[in-house]
Image (cartoon, grey):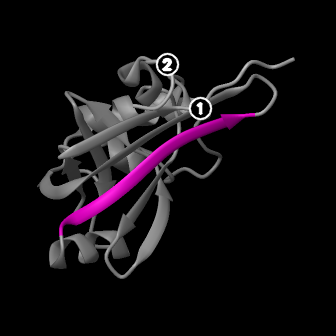
Amino acid sequence: MTGPAFDIDAFLAEPLQARVATNGPTVRPLWYQWEDGCFWILNGPWAKLYHRVLRDPEIALVIDVYELDTGRVLQVMASGAVEVTPYDIPRARRMLHRYLGPDESKWSTKPDDYPGYLREPGPPGAVWLKLAPRKLLPFNFSFQKD
């Protein structure tokens, strides 16, 4: 680790975006859920990422913040092989609450944006991509603001 230690679990619980890289190469921003030492990524056959990890499950991702006004500069980098796991609504609800807030009635003005994620059986073909990182590297480059 670079710099002072920080609470990785608390950092990864923030509603931050991950950037996921696959062989190709491609990089895409996405939401994730950090639970039980694993990254959970909602996905399915509608997404290019799903097809890429079926061909090659190795991915790398980074979550970072750079707050110039406070001096907070933190990064977590992870890599490993993704496992395709069944979709479950409770995990989807936890992730969506984290990013969109607990009041589901305020999530969207479009009626079908998110409710399908929370009704059985979920979106057609939906799965979770589970990354139990082989490598998890935290970096703290924070600085004191004058």
Label disc, if present, on residue 4 of the rendered structure? 2
Q: CA distance from mark 1 to mark 2?
A: 8 Å
Q: Residues within 10 Å of mark 1 (few under 14, many from 20)?
A: some
Name the side, left or right, on which 133 lies relative to 143: left
Amino acid identity at mark 2 = Pro
Task: Pinpoint residue 133: horizontal percent, then vertical percent.
Answer: 21, 45
For the point 42% across and 30% down, the residue is 12
Height in image: 126 above or below 6? below
Q: Which residues are magenta?
A: 57-67
For the point 26% across and 51% down, the residue is 122
At mark 2, the secondary structure is: loop
Task: Pinpoint residue 63: horizontal percent, then vertical percent.
Answer: 48, 43
Q: In the image shown, does 86 or 135 lie closer to the viewer?
A: 135
Q: Can residue 55 be seen from the camera position used here? A: yes
Height in image: 65 above or below 134? above
Name the side, left or right, on which 86 lies relative to 120: left
Check residue 61 for magenta coloring: yes
Amino acid identity at mark 1 = Phe
Sequence-earlier tag: 1 or 2: 2
Location of residue 51 by image quarter: bottom left
Q: Which residue is mark 1?
A: 141
